[in-house]
Amino acid sequence: MAGNRISGRRRFLGTVGAAAVTGLAGCAGGGGSGDTSGGSSGDGTVEGDTSDGSTSPTTDTGAGSGSGSGSADASIGVLLPFTGEYDWVGGNVLPVVEMLVDALNSSGGIDGTQVRVVQADTEATVDASVSAAQKLINVDSVDLIVGPTSLTFTGVIDLIRENGVPVVTPTAGTTALDSVGGEYIFRTVPSDSLGGRAISRAARNQEFNTAASYENMGLMVGNAPALQSFKEPISSSFEEYGGTLTSVLDYATGKSSYQSEVSKMLSSDPELVTLVGTPEDSAKILRAAFQAGYEGNWFVTQDQTNADFLELTDDRVTEGILGLVEADSPAAVEAGRVEQFAADFQSYAGREPGIFAKNTFDAVNIGALAMKAALAADGELTRDGIAAQIRPVATPGGETVTNYAEGAAALDAGSEVNYEGLVGPCDFDENGDIASPFAVMKASDGAWEQVATLPADEL
């Protein structure tokens, strides 16, 4: 993952569209740009415009009276990188959380309970993430955590489980979570296990990639844990689908040149190379292969399938390469919810939603509905109570709802609810994972275009 640094100041309060205020409706961005133009102020406090032109904080970054043990308000912690190389992740997720929470509070909160957003910077490092999580859990006493990323989840997972804090992460696809979630930890982004299978399935079938049914593939994977998460799923599934791996090569991230690694890979004569890495490293690798005369194709992951990556090199290098992103739910697209949120978010934040935005929309709506259901069941908000309601509010069989307002009305009427979001049904399995469709993308004239949709049931 990589992207632009956060800069400037967002326009937040007073600009949310009517649909978002009344229904927390719609979201886009699973395959969007990593752009984070407009961000937090220099001291880390997120600010929003007030009607008189002054600014006021909309997100807490310090200690507060959270409701981990049941107080008069509720709180959501956003545990993500806001500084450093991956600051764009927090920059893409936080404004979606704030927009939905602002809308929720403007409509009376959760049965009169107002919701606070508490920001914690993991800096994309394990040490910083542990400190940030400890503060959210023990000082701010947050009720629910949105985040973290695959980069830092292994550092905080024990802390989360030991304290019984419910987590709905829109950003952590790491396979390390494949068998440890489902009680306190859920995610609205598919596992890299599913994403890796999607890449292999698309690579092996011309109907999905529109180029060729590739039989011989090389695999290059950066040595960072979040990148290595894709290695086994891609390797095993490509062979399962009948392909042959010519070479599997790990490379050190952040190097100035990858000529030797590229030479080694190309010596295995692959028709296609799947490349798992940051956009910056991937651009260097593609340029080195182009200069070496490689005439095969490339397949990249979601972290590179964005406009930022294509801007790092010229069209001759990237023309025709393949990429993969989560596809928007067909039902959400048909109903106009994705388009509506894009418009609402543009009005609220002054820019288009980016990567992980629609996953964040679903995470916040599910979390808010779980809070609503916990209050109804227990008469108070507790972490255990919220965690126990996350799966039920997204389980098939109840009344289908697509946002908090619809779900709250159904719960008030005594109905069970089945939340269906923008990434799909959000039917959590026993490990808190979801299945979602993927979009196969192809670079053409300096832009990504979708060439096929790969349904989850094809994997």
Image: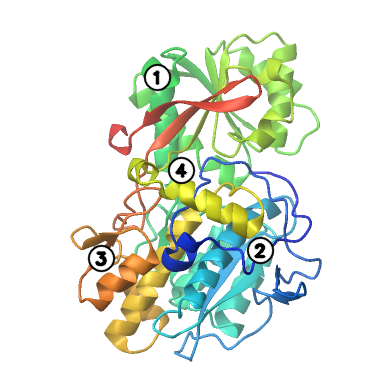
Q: Secondary structure at mark 3?
A: strand
Residue 69 in percent (x, y) is at 46, 89
Residue 122 disc label: 2
- Whether pointer 3 and pointer 4 mark residues with C-beta atoms closer than 8 Å, the reply is no
Q: Which residue is mark 3?
A: 417
> Looking at the image, is mark 2 or mark 1 earlier in the sequence?
2
Q: Secondary structure at mark 1?
A: helix
Is 392 drawn above or below residue 290 in the view shown? below
**Which quadrant holds the N terminus?**
top right
> Looking at the image, is mark 1 or mark 3 earlier in the sequence?
1
Task: Give the label, 3 or 2, closer to the camera.
Answer: 3
Residue 224 in percent (x, y) is at 63, 44
Q: Amino acid at mark 1?
A: Arg
Q: Which residue is mark 1?
A: 204
> Looking at the image, is mark 4 or mark 1 earlier in the sequence?
4
Q: Amino acid at mark 2?
A: Thr
Q: Could you say which quadrant of the image residue 284 lies in?
A: top right
- Whether pointer 4 and pointer 1 mark residues with C-beta atoms closer than 8 Å, the reply is no
Q: Which residue is mark 4?
A: 192
The CA distance from mark 2 to mark 1 is 38 Å
> Looking at the image, is mark 4 or mark 2 earlier in the sequence?
2
Task: Give the label, 3 or 4, closer to the camera.
Answer: 3
Q: Amino acid at mark 4?
A: Asp
Q: Secondary structure at mark 2?
A: loop
Question: Residue drawn 51% across and 70% down?
Answer: 103
**Which quadrant holds the C terminus?**
top left
The CA distance from mark 4 to mark 1 is 18 Å
Q: Amino acid at mark 3?
A: Val
Is 221 drawn above or below residue 328 in the view shown? above
The CA distance from mark 4 to mark 2 is 21 Å
Evaluate whether residue 173 shows in this view: no
